[in-house]
Image (cartoon, rainbow, N blue to C red):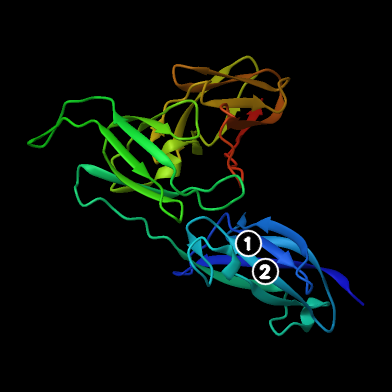
Amino acid sequence: MATPETVRVYTVDQNDDALEGVLVRFFDDTDTFVTQNYSALVGSDVYAEVTLDGDAVPIEYTVRLSKTGVAFDGALGDDSKTPQSIEVYSPAAGAPSGTNDFTVQGQTFERPVAADPYLCRASGFFRDAAGRPLRNFDMHFTLQRSPLLVGDDGILGFKVYGTTDNNGYFEVDLYRFGDYLVELQSLEHQRCVSVPDVSSINLVELLFPVVSSVVYDPTAVTVAAGDTQAVDVTITDSTGLTRELTESLLTFTSEDESVATIGISAGQLIVSGQSAGSTTITVTQTDTSIVVIPEITLDSLSVTVS
């Protein structure tokens, strides 16, 4: 008799390093979609976990995997060539491995680097609303400070034009530390980007940067009721740049404002003790116009008020 079982699909790259954000979809023997999940970090492992029916005579499923810029047994970006078969046992101990755990390997895209030490090569893949490669998509980059002296060279041409190829791929060399105004074919508003001091970068993250990590100093706060504690916050965005703490960038919320409240002053987080107890300060992106899937979870701050 079929019984629900926990199934985990571990995703790694060609170097056996964990690969997050892989969409893992499951289909039954009639090729009917059953369920899906994204691989995510859980403890020290990265996997997608779902519940599927298993039996003593294992039930077979087809797994299809996809992540932009990663190939799973097929052409880069071609999901139709990624199906893999798995067998789910119930009880799981009846499986050859003793579990309903599986590991799949993807070939990651090796990002090209700029040959010139003053340049950063921005590259990335783009898709349309149906998930297909976005072909012949125009982008215009305008350097905001020109003329410009780089080494012994004068930079006088300040516009760069380009179009995505048949795989939705585009790459362009941009000056490090440069500010560019970018026109994208389908967007009404231009994007202003700052190029970091690196040899290569994901163009998508450069165009649509979001906060990727928040580090607190101290890592936990103990404060007396009626007192305040200043906390230094190091903010890194998806391009690797360090950002200044502002309310327009991040929104901090105390889960129990009767215990502690939160504010921002002079680039620091200010925790104000209200009454004895404990609470957690959570943080979210203030700008919700850029939606990231899977969602980025930023670290919270524990507060104890004495």
Residue at image position (61%, 64%) is 65
Specify few, some or many for label 1: CA neighbours under 10 Å numbering under 14, 14-19, or 20 or more.
many
> Could you tell me the amino acid type at mark 1?
Tyr
**Residue 119 in the image, given as x and y percentages of width and height:** 23, 43
Q: Position of residue 27 (x, y in %)?
A: 74, 67
Q: Is residue 213 visible?
A: no
| Residue in the picture at 32% in, 55% down | 112
* Quadrant location of the C terminus in the rendered image: top right
Q: CA distance from mark 2 to mark 1?
A: 14 Å
Relative to 289, is 170 on the left or the right?
left
Picture layout, residue 210 above or below residue 268:
below
Q: Secondary structure at mark 1?
A: strand
Quarter that holds the N terminus = bottom right
Q: Earlier in the sequence, mark 2 or mark 1?
A: 1
x and y percent of residue 44 in the render?
57, 59
For disc 2, the marked residue is 63
Amino acid type indicated by mark 2: Val
182 displayed left or right of 27: left
Residue 206, compared with residue 115, is above or below; it is: above
Front residue of 221 and 98: 98
Residue drawn 38% across the image and 45% down it: 163
Residue placed most toward the observer, 270 or 18: 18
Q: Which residue is mark 1?
A: 47
Q: Can you say whether 223 is above or below 170 in the image?
A: above
Q: Is residue 265 visible?
A: yes
* Count of numbered badges drawn on the protein: 2
The one of 254 and 47 positioned closer to us in this rendering: 47
Quarter of image, res 36: bottom right
